[in-house]
Image (cartoon, rainbow, N blue to C red):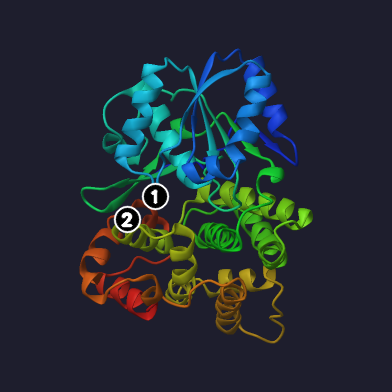
Amino acid sequence: MSNTFRFFMPNVSLMGAGCVSDAVQSMLDLKFRKALVVTDQVLVNVGVVGKVTDKLKKANIDFVVYSGTSPNPTVANVEAGLSLLKENTCDFVVSIGGGSPHDCAKGIALLATNGGSIKDYEGVNKSQKPQLPLIAINTTAGTASEMTRFAVVTDEDKHIKMVIVDKNVTPIIAVNDTELMMNMPKSLTAATGMDALTHAVEAYVSTISTPITDACALKAIRLISDFLPRAVENGQDGEAREMMAHAEYLAGMAFNSASLGYVHAMAHQLGGFYNLPHGVCNAVLLPHVQRFNAKVVPGRLAEIAKSMGISTTGLDHSEAANAAIEGIVELSKKVGIPSGIAELGVKKEDIDILVENALKDATGLTNPIQATPEEIRSIYLAAF
């Protein structure tokens, strides 16, 4: 087995209020001709997409908009966007939104050069060629899909989320312009922020974490603990929005190379089966999975407690780990996350299929302890 560690990032990342203008200049510099803009109808309706496309018009960059992305993007979404791209002979893709438009755009861009169905690329590094150039403009502070090699697409026939891990789906430019994040609703701010926290925690306890990913994860946890409640309380708080943008990007840097764990493996099933918001599923499951993990990595969870600003003086690793878990529960409660999966409409009679699919999910491979089906079942039940 190789001892080589791999660290993945986009070639260029732009951050800060107003940086969309720099992204448009980059498109001009790269001499792209026509963009497929991938987004969702809500972002069109509230005017966020217009803020970007107005800049494209001013720069004389031609484009066509695909706004059909579902909250959990589907195989059909990818195929519809690909058809529009081909009809208009687009030579690059611009995604505007959170994880859903980014993941849909990754699927479209990958198929544009590699062919076949997005189902062919479930798993790790299944593609042969770089995707069509993708510039990902982020409007939430959560998924980090704008800078990762991960994409999640729902197979609507099987009601499962397919995880695609492939260096070829990494955007060439990641854009985090906080001017596009100011009007995010409280519930979305909370859900995406807890998604970022989950990324950081899972990357930190991952079996393939490194000092580089650890540094990114711990700083992300610190920033989220300090600034997520502020961003939820006041969406116009520029500093809180800026710090959350940095936090979600740092968490992305961590899990993009260290991968994830059972929180995501289990949350993907809830999202795919019931069409639930990914960040909320992660937030509800996070403390329950970490109680399971605390059996083997209490020291790691103790460090997470410190990064959350929790005093661990006089506590052993096990006690400090419990303090971290309680801190996660308190933060979730503070930002208005539901307390259990029953509130999300999850049914106990579906647990068998959820367990079966969770154990097939690639993100669970780097969890610090491998679980039996009965242990995954127990975690789901504890989360009710």
Nearer the observer, 189 or 166: 189
Query: Measured from the top left, where is residue 316 in percent x and y?
Result: 61, 84
Q: Say what secondary structure mark 1 lies in.
A: loop
Residue 357 located left or right of residue 57: left
Query: Measured from the top left, where is residue 383 in percent x and y?
Result: 39, 77
Residue 236 located left or right of residue 6: right
Location of the C terminus (image quadrant): bottom left
Within 10 Å of the Cα at label 2, are there few (<14), some (14-19), or many (20+) other Cα atoms?
many
The residue type indicated by label 2 comes to: Gly
Report, in whole angstroms, how far the alpha carbon at label 1 lies from the one at label 2: 8 Å
Q: Say what secondary structure mark 2 lies in.
A: helix
Q: Is residue 48 above or below residue 236?
A: above
Given contact means CB atoms under 8 Å apart, are the residues at marks 1 and 2 in contact?
A: yes
Q: Residue furthest front?
A: 45
* Residue 312 seen from this side: yes
* Residue at image mark 1: 72
Residue 62 located left or right of residue 77: right
Location of the N terminus (image quadrant): top left
The residue type indicated by label 1 comes to: Asn
Image quadrant assignment for residue 13: top right
User: Between disc 1 and disc 2, whose residue precedes?
Assistant: 1
* Residue at image mark 2: 272
Q: Looking at the image, which residue is at 49% across and 38% down?
A: 39
Q: Is residue 83 above or below residue 256?
A: above
Q: Looking at the image, which residue is at 52% across and 44% down?
A: 145
Nearer the observer, 25 or 131: 25
Query: Measured from the top left, where is residue 150 in percent x and y?
Result: 45, 43
Query: Measured from the top left, where is residue 227 in percent x and y?
Result: 71, 63
Within 10 Å of the Cα at label 1, are there few (<14), some (14-19), or many (20+) other Cα atoms?
many
Q: Residue furthest bottom?
A: 314
Count how many numbered circles sit on residues in the image. Answer: 2
